[in-house]
Image (spheres, rainbow, N blue to C red):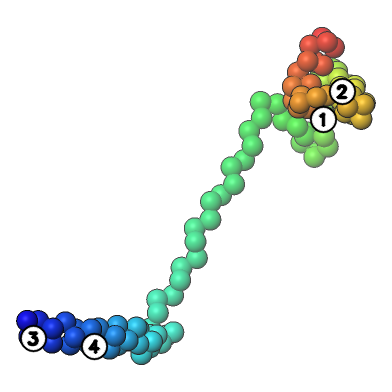
Amino acid sequence: MMLRSLGVAAALIAAPAVAQAQTAAPAARSAPPAAAAPAASPAPTAKPKAKRSAVPTATADGAKRERSPAQLANDQKMRECGAEWRAAKAAGKTGSQKWNQFLSECRKRKA
């Protein structure tokens, strides 16, 4: 029994010393010199994809094309629906409705 007590006591005394040595060891290591470190290669850059459009948006000389009648009609609907949305929102009549829901209903009314 006495030997067992001495073994436990010795282990308890030695444990803090071992733990202290383990924590001190990483601090004693030195970092490798900067010259020995491999040079970092630049990250590969992805090329931006060109937007493809069925109809070009500009002419050969760089001037923008005129908008089609359908596009102009859409622009007008967006302006009208936007004005209705702002008025309804200011009056507090939108409730939990979001802009995209309102726009969908407005477009149906305008069709």
Which numbered circle lies on residue 2? Answer: 3
| Quadrant housing the C terminus | top right
**How many neighbours does mark 2 have within 10 angstroms: few (below 14), some (14-19), or many (20 or more)?**
few
Q: Earlier in the sequence, mark 3 or mark 4?
A: 3
The nearer-to-camera label among 3 and 1 is 3
Q: Position of residue 66 (x, y in %)?
A: 85, 27
Name the residue rendered at 79%, 21% in the picture. Answer: 102
Q: Earlier in the sequence, mark 2 or mark 1?
A: 1
**How many neighbours does mark 4 have within 10 angstroms: few (below 14), some (14-19), or many (20 or more)?**
few
Q: Earlier in the sequence, mark 2 or mark 3?
A: 3
| Quadrant housing the N terminus | bottom left
Query: Closer to the camera, 27 or 50?
Result: 27
Looking at numbered disc 3 in the image, what kind of residue is underneath it?
Met
Residue at numbered disc 1: 65
Left or right relative to 85: residue 52: left
Looking at numbered disc 4 in the image, what kind of residue is underneath it?
Ile
Left or right relative to 31: residue 85: right
Name the residue rendered at 92%, 30% in the picture. Answer: 90
* Residue 71 visible in this rendered orientation of the protein: no
The nearer-to-camera label among 2 and 1 is 2
Q: Earlier in the sequence, mark 1 or mark 4?
A: 4
Residue at numbered disc 4: 13
Q: Position of residue 88 (x, y in %)?
A: 89, 24
Looking at numbered disc 2 in the image, what kind of residue is underneath it?
Lys
Which numbered circle lies on residue 93? Answer: 2
Cα distance, mark 3 to mark 4?
16 Å
Callout 2 secondary element: loop
Q: Earlier in the sequence, mark 4 or mark 2?
A: 4
Cα distance, mark 3 to mark 1?
100 Å
Name the residue rendered at 62%, 40% in the picture. Answer: 50
